[in-house]
Amino acid sequence: YGTLDGKVALVTGGSRGIGAATALRLARDGADVAVTYVNGKDAAADVVRRIEALGRRAVALRADSADAEEAVAAVERTAEALGGLDVLVNNAGVGVLGPLDGLALADVDRVLAVNVRGVFLTSQAAAARMASGGRIITIGTCMTQRVPWAGGTLYATSKAALVGLTKALARELGGRGIAANIVHPGPIDTDMNPADGPSAADQAAMTAIGRYGTAEEVAGMVAYLAGAEYVTGAEFAVDGGFAA
Ligand code: NDP
């Protein structure tokens, strides 16, 4: 038996990268899982197939976190398809890096809509739906703790907001038995940040361990937090020592 037997999880942005690895890991630990996506319909369907092959139920939902109605509706659609919601993983995010003077208003609006407003609204809807034992786990970034290069203003701004949200959610929901925590990945090999990308060697060198992490390594921390007791309002780095 898995630690998450009988639980229902929603992983936003679960078609690829950290979200896909997290969805699979939660299913391996016993959960039924909904994943959202925007463009990756086939990739999301593949994640569903792999979860079903583990003997769990799964559903792929097209839901753009930048769209307020869709960000909220993902919670109800999950509950309708899988019978409730116990674990929310706020993973969907966009990384827009670049010089301050090159960031347009549209960049600011887009990044804040996906990385902050969508996370807020989905968490709000999830909290309203969750019973005691509910878990809200948000994916931040090591750049909330250390920004060793130029070009991170917008991304770091957006992800730092999630630290405040997590601590405030923990205070707001603790009395109802619902925990909120945030995980800060370091350089993780995904489409967003490939381990053979132009700045990959610099990023790897900035860690204490000297390499990129894997999406599965981040998923392990999320799975721990999904089943943890007496852990809330806390930040967890899975960054190979990037912020040390
Ligand atoms: P990827 O770009 O590899 O995957 C992003 C996933 O999010 C995809 O499933 C994508 O769906 C989905 N997504 C993107 N935009 C939206 C949206 N508007 N609404 C719903 N889903 C969306 O990213 P990673 O796996 O690398 O990143 C996952 C999270 O981890 C992000 O929050 C990122 O900021 C954070 N992170 C990543 C790090 C890294 O080094 N990789 C480091 C620190 C933090 P689709 O397939 O449809 O495009």
Image (spheres, helix red, strand yellow):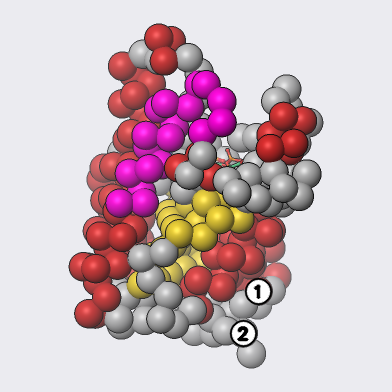
Q: Residue at x 48, y 44 (%)?
A: 145
Q: Residue at x 32, y 75 (%)?
A: 178
Q: Residue at x 33, y 44 (%)?
A: 161
User: In the rendering, at what x and y percent does residue 194 appear?
Assistant: 71, 35
Quarter location, residue 74: bottom left
Mark 1 nearby-residue class (10 Å; few <14, some 14–19, many ≥20): many
**Image quadrant in which the N terminus is located:** bottom right
Residue bounds of the magenta highlight: 147-164
Note whether residue 85 is visible.
Answer: no
The answer to whether residue 189 is left or right of residue 225 is right
Q: Secondary structure at mark 1?
A: helix
The residue that label 1 is drawn on is 28
User: In the rendering, at what x and y percent does residue 6 appear?
Assistant: 49, 84
Q: Are marks 2 and 1 in contact (CB under 8 Å)?
A: yes
Q: Earlier in the sequence, mark 2 or mark 1?
A: 2
- Residue 2, label in figure: 2
User: In the rendering, at what x and y percent does residue 38 appear?
Assistant: 47, 40
Q: Amino acid at mark 1?
A: Arg
Tell me which secondary structure the magenta stretch mostly adopts: helix
Q: Secondary structure at mark 2?
A: loop
